[in-house]
Amino acid sequence: MIITEGGYRKFWEDEYMNCPTCGAFLPDNATMCNTCKTVFQMGYRPAEPAQSQPFLGGKGPAMTYNEPVSPLVQTMAQKIAEPVENKKQQQTQKRFPLVPVLIGSGALVIVAVLVTLIAVFAGKDRGTEVAADDSTESTFGSIGSDITEEEDTSYASAGVHYEEFNIGETWTVDGQWMLTVLGAKKTEERNNYSDREPEVVYIVDYMYTNIGYEDAVMDGVYFSLNDIIIDSKGRSGYSYNANVINYAQEAPLGATCRAQASIGLDHDGTFKINMTRYDDDCKPHSASFIIDPGKEAYDVELPSVDTPDAPALAIGETWTVDGQWSVTVTGVRETDSRSEYTEKNPEKVYIVEYTYTNLGYEDEIMDGLYIALDDMIIDSAGVMGYSYPGDTNKYPKTIKSGETCTAESCIGVEHGGDFRVSISKYDSEKNKQKETFNIKVN
């Protein structure tokens, strides 16, 4: 019998085959089809048993005819072969309808690429000539700098209006933040572990203040200066991993962060940093800082920010999160010890003593509870402090449920006196918990 498998009919199962006119099943040596009444003068025989063949198609014929073959059979075979061939062509066109179009499009693309490359090289030569003739024209506009049109970087700021600021000028977004670039100095230091090879590296000093910005995820406003950087020839700059002393931190409400950014450039001279930040209402604000390394560095006066008196804990008071942890600051002392392993030069160094207990906190990554007091420090002038490698051997450690750890944190500040320490941590249920301790030094 004939077996249908995956759209193909198998022959040479028993003695059956198909009528070439209507496809009906026929026994071997049949002389007429009982379905369409097609007459076969000499009958026909099956092809050699080799492989399954598709019905009315495939790589080889499902049957062959004996000679001589009547004109009727030849006509029928021709009528069958023509639609089969047409069907093959139609199927090919359906499967690959875009082949002619793609071939033509490919040729057009090649021509377009060649034209573009010619235009780019011609434009670079023209840009170099312009730069040589008139050094005042730049991608920044006529600002009297040495920035030329060597490379078009307009794509980076298309459709965005940047308010421009020079060194020492402050970008203020009311009720959100204040940001000032204080200066830039060249460094000869290079990172042996970096794949980049900048022509020049600058350390940029800057400061920013949180004057009202609040975020559901972050603990304050944060600026890193690694956005869109454009060098004196219009080339893109980048953040470079060189040694900086003060790192950017999340500044909570009322706090100021002094920070540094390391920037690599392919060309020396005045450069530009474009940035866009969203306020706590998700509204974008854009600024452009034009940084001339030849200008004298500024040291602007710290802003005074009126902030509501938030509730805080004192030394000896305990912060408890039910079923998670408890933390108590037990004391503070000043130390004159300074570390030879850091370039930081704090005015004062304090060692804060504290204890914490695991009341049931669990973490998918850490094997218990770990709390440090050096993440968010605000000194007496409202400037962010930092962890300092001081003289202590009581370090915080990871503890399991029911255990207690007694530890010390060494803290450096730019202004001596009372300071604040804030702790921000997610509990086992991924809820953010936060508390502040007021540390009275005297």
Image (cartoon, rainbow, N blue to C red):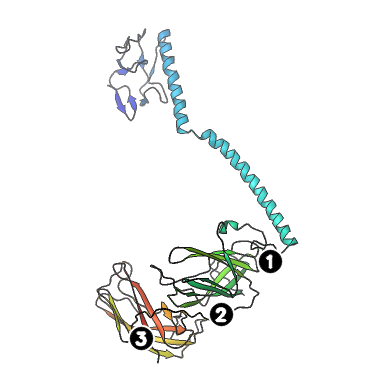
Work out whether 309 lies above or below 335: above
| Residue indicated by mark 1 | 146
Q: Secondary structure at mark 1?
A: loop
- Determine whether 97 is above or below 379 in the image: above
Residue 205 placed where, x, y %? 56, 75
Disc 2 + disc 3, Cβ < 8 Å: no
Local crowd size for mark 1, using a 10 Å CA cut-off: few (<14), some (14–19), many (≥20): many
* Residue 203 screen position, x and y as percent: 57, 73
What residue is shown at x 42% (from left), y 78% (from top)?
307
> Sequence order check: which comes first, mark 3 or mark 1?
1
Which residue sits at x=45%, y=87%? 349
Callout 1 amino acid: Asp
Decide: marks 3, 1 in contact (CB < 8 A)?
A: no
Q: Nearer the viewer, residue 344 or 329?
A: 329
- Judged from the image, the secondary structure of the residue bearing numbered disc 2 is loop
Task: Return the mark for residue 280.
Answer: none
Q: Which of label 2 and label 3 is nearer to you?
A: 2
Of pointers 2 and 3, the one earlier in the residue sequence: 2
Query: Disc number at residue 300?
Result: 2
Q: Quadrant of residue 263?
A: bottom right
As shown in the figure, which amino acid type bears the numbered disc 3? Glu
Residue on which disc 3 sits: 353
- Up the image or down, 400 lies above or below 394; here it is above
Q: Measuring 56% from the left and 61% from the top, which residue is drawn there? A: 161
State how far apart marks 2 and 3 are (Cα): 34 Å
